[in-house]
């Protein structure tokens, strides 16, 4: 059992874990301030307090912790990929997958970010291509860690559920085995009733003969009568006790008391079975009552299983006797012209048989034979007073099947975790292809509008005649704009490699020209 951690120590451990996580995540913003030129200082420096807040709320509000680095990342670049915040997005995405029991809120969050970034990139950047970079970064840097975290959570839940099921099934198996043992003890009590009742009946009979003997005195005949009445009363009380112990579904003993093994084998042969019996002549002589009943039940149960699982197979019953021990082995091969019989698993026959052999002071073994059949063997004491063998644990094959099912569920979740990013990536590629085919017609600047533009015009007047979207990049070979100027490019026609270049200096149009693609050398 896992020891309980004191609350103070648990809070201290949580505080140290949060501090270590915050220090690790602050390394990337510190590196960006020193090594990334042109990075917005304000948005990058805001990472230190924002990450501290995200670390504090990561347990109760994992989506809030994930959303806090998104806003400064978009302030730095519309692609969402930044040196300062990318590690934080991956870490908080993973933690959100681990801590959130439901996937729907996170999916709505991802869908909202993707839908909100589209108009943002179109309005601010006047092009939709940064939106695809945003989706790719969101998929790889956020969604994939979230899927990995969710897989870990589901794996832990499945393992915990599997062990709970295993514990419950073990308890049920122990209960079934205990009921079977109690039922077997009731059968043993019934067998003892038959044996003791027979002996008591003989005592009563002899006492009755003494009561009628003329050579005895009246006093002795009265004592014999009392003995006869006491034997009869003991027989009745014994029958009442056995009746109380017997379960509702338990009938009277199915076999006559004292039936020998040869007689049992003869009845099996009469029913159509092929049975070979090998035993010495004194195999059943002088055995204790418990050993004799256990021997009978081992042979009986083995013949029953052979008739059930391998009909038509030849059964071999071999009994050997030594000074202090009796060994019985019942073997039958596989079913003729068919598959080998499966060992009895989960049934009560062998469990009850094991209980009877154990109470007799012996040991039972049952399992597949090397040739594909099945063997039941038992070793029984030939003298009384032998202590019962220790109880064995119940079989838990059903538990193993349940745990195998849990592992199969985990593998299925893992396949989903790997397949979802690839499916989303394929959809993104298709969407980019469609956008590549459609955007040229959305970025064309009419020739009449271009001719009306004059250097020196206000930016607001120029933008009133421009298309809503601009080209994502200038034609190949176009020189970079001069310092202090920003240039935008618009298509001349949907199928032309040339573009209109409009360069602004502040709020005024500085230059305009037609930029053409330069041939590569």
Image (cartoon, rainbow, N blue to C red):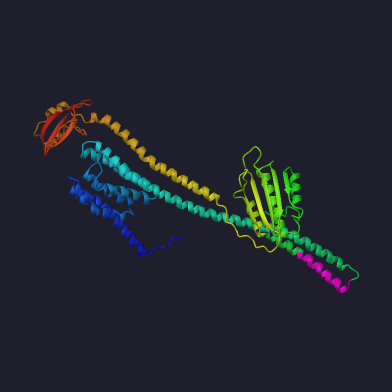
Between residue 509 and residue 269, name the one nearer to us: 269
User: In the image, what residue occupies the spot 29% across and 48% down?
Assistant: 89
Q: Is residue 233 magenta?
A: yes
Figure label count:
0
Residue 134 makes an appearance in the image = yes
User: In the image, what residue occupies the spot 71% across and 53% down?
Assistant: 320
Q: Is residue 237 above or below residue 154?
A: below
What is the quadrant of residue 392 in the picture? Answer: bottom right
Q: Position of residue 153 (x, y in %)?
A: 40, 50
Between residue 207 and residue 518, name the one nearer to us: 518
State the predominant SS element of the stretch in magenta. Answer: helix
Residue most toward the right? 214
Between residue 178 and residue 400, name the one nearer to us: 400
Residue most toward the left? 456
Locate residue 135 relative to residue 398 in the image: left or right: left
What is the quadrant of residue 323 in the picture? Answer: bottom right
Residue 43 makes an appearance in the image = no
Between residue 463 and residue 515, name the one nearer to us: 515
User: In the image, what residue occupies the spot 66% across and 39% down?
Assistant: 336
User: In the image, what residue occupies the spot 33% across and 37% down?
Assistant: 425
Q: Is residue 75 above or below residue 434?
A: below
- Region of the chain picked out in magenta, as a range: 216-234
Q: Is residue 280 magenta?
A: no
């Amino acid at each position: 059992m896992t020891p309980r951690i004191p609350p103070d120590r648990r809070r201290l451990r949580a505080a140290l874990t949060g501090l270590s996580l915050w220090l690790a995540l602050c390394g990337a913003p510190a590196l960006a301030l020193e090594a990334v030129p042109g990075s917005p200082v304000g948005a990058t420096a805001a990472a230190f307090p924002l990450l501290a807040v995200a670390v504090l709320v990561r347990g109760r509000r994992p989506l809030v912790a994930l959303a806090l680095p998104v806003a400064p990342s978009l302030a730095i670049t519309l692609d969402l990929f930044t040196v300062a915040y990318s590690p934080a997005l991956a870490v908080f995405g993973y933690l959100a997958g681990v801590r959130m029991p439901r996937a729907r809120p996170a999916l709505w969050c991802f869908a909202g970010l993707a839908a909100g970034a589209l108009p943002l990139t179109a309005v601010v950047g006047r092009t939709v291509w940064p939106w695809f970079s945003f989706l790719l970064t969101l998929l790889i840097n956020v969604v994939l860690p979230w899927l990995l975290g969710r897989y870990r959570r589901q794996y832990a839940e499945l393992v915990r559920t599997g062990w709970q099921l295993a514990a419950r099934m073990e308890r049920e198996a122990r209960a079934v085995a205990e009921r079977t043992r109690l039922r077997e003890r009731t059968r043993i009590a019934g067998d003892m009733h038959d044996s003791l009742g027979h002996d008591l009946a003989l005592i009563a009979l002899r006492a009755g003969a003494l009561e009628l003997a003329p050579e005895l005195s009246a006093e002795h005949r009265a004592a014999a009568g009392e003995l006869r009445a006491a034997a009869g009363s003991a027989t009745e009380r014994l029958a009442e006790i056995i009746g109380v112990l017997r379960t509702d579904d338990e009938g009277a003993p199915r076999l006559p008391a004292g039936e020998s093994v040869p007689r049992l084998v003869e009845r099996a042969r009469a029913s159509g079975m092929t049975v070979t019996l090998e035993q010495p002549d004194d195999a059943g002589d002088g055995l204790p009552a418990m050993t004799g009943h256990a021997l009978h039940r081992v042979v009986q149960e083995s013949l029953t299983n052979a008739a059930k699982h391998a009909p038509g197979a030849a059964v071999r019953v071999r009994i050997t006797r030594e000074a202090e021990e009796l060994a019985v082995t019942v073997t039958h091969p596989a079913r003729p012209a068919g598959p080998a019989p499966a060992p009895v698993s989960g049934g009560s026959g062998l469990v009850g048989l094991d209980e009877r052999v154990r109470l007799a002071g012996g040991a039972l073994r049952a399992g597949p034979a090397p040739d594909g059949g099945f063997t039941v063997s038992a070793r029984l004491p030939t003298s009384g007073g032998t202590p019962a063998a220790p109880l064995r644990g119940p079989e838990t094959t059903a538990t193993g099947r349940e745990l195998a099912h849990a592992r199969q569920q985990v593998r299925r979740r893992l396949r989903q975790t790997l397949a979802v990013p690839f499916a989303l990536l394929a959809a993104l590629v298709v969407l980019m292809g469609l956008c590549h085919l459609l955007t040229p017609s959305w970025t064309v600047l009419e020739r009449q509008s271009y001719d009306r533009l004059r250097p020196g015009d206000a930016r607001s007047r120029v933008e009133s005649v421009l298309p809503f979207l601009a080209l994502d990049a200038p034609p190949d070979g176009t020189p970079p704009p001069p310092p202090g100027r920003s240039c935008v490019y618009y298509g001349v026609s949907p199928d032309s490699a040339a573009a209109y270049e409009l360069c602004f200096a502040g709020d005024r149009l500085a230059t305009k020209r037609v930029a053409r693609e330069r041939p590569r050398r």
